[in-house]
Amino acid sequence: MISTPVLLTVIVVVLVVLVLAVLLVLRARARAAGRPMPPAPTRPTSPTAVICPFCKHVYEPAESSRRCPSCGAAAPRR
């Protein structure tokens, strides 16, 4: 038969492992629920407006020297 100190040690270790597992699951759920979705790119309002392929910012290339005002990337060629 297993001695009492060994049995107590095993019970404590099992309880600690269970508590850690529950805490990890709760933390993962909280992170997934609190993560906001990135904004969907909006459609250009004018026929010459462009959506930046890097930062998804809508801008008018002629008004910003063919550079995205948000991230500085060059406007894509049409």
Image (cartoon, rainbow, N blue to C red):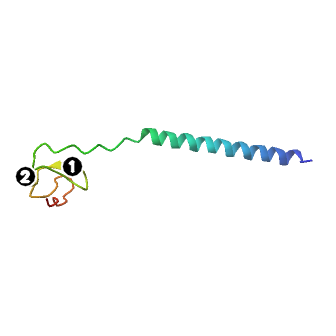
User: Residue 64 in the image: x percent, y percent?
Assistant: 10, 54
Q: How many marks?
A: 2
From the image, tell me which residue sits under label 2: 63
Q: Nearer the viewer, residue 7 or 54?
A: 54
On screen, residue 66 above or below 33: below
- For mark 2, does the 10 Å Cα neighbourhood hold few (<14), some (14 to 19), or many (20 or more) residues? few
Q: Secondary structure at mark 2?
A: helix
Q: Amino acid at mark 1?
A: His
Residue at image x 49%, y 39%? 30
Residue 62 at x, y percent in the picture: 7, 54
Question: x%, y% of residue 54?
Answer: 25, 56
Left or right of 37 on screen, residue 17: right
Secondary element type, mark 1: loop
Residue drawn at the location 29% of the way across and 43% of the way down = 39
**Earlier along the polypeptide chain: callout 2 or callout 1?**
1
Image quarter of residue 46? top left
Q: Does residue 76 lie above or below 59 as drawn? A: below
> Neighbour class for label 1 at 10 Å: few (<14), some, many (≥20)?
some
Q: Residue furthest left?
A: 62
Residue at (79, 47) in percent of width and height: 9
Question: Furthest-right residue in view?
Answer: 1
Say which quarter of the image contains residue 11.
top right
Position of residue 20 in the picture relative to residue 74 (left or right): right
Quadrant including the C terminus: bottom left
Whole-angstrom CA distance, mark 2 to mark 1, is 14 Å
Relative to the observer, which residue lies in front, 13 or 74? 74
- Which residue, given by chain and number where applicable, does mark 1 sit on? 57
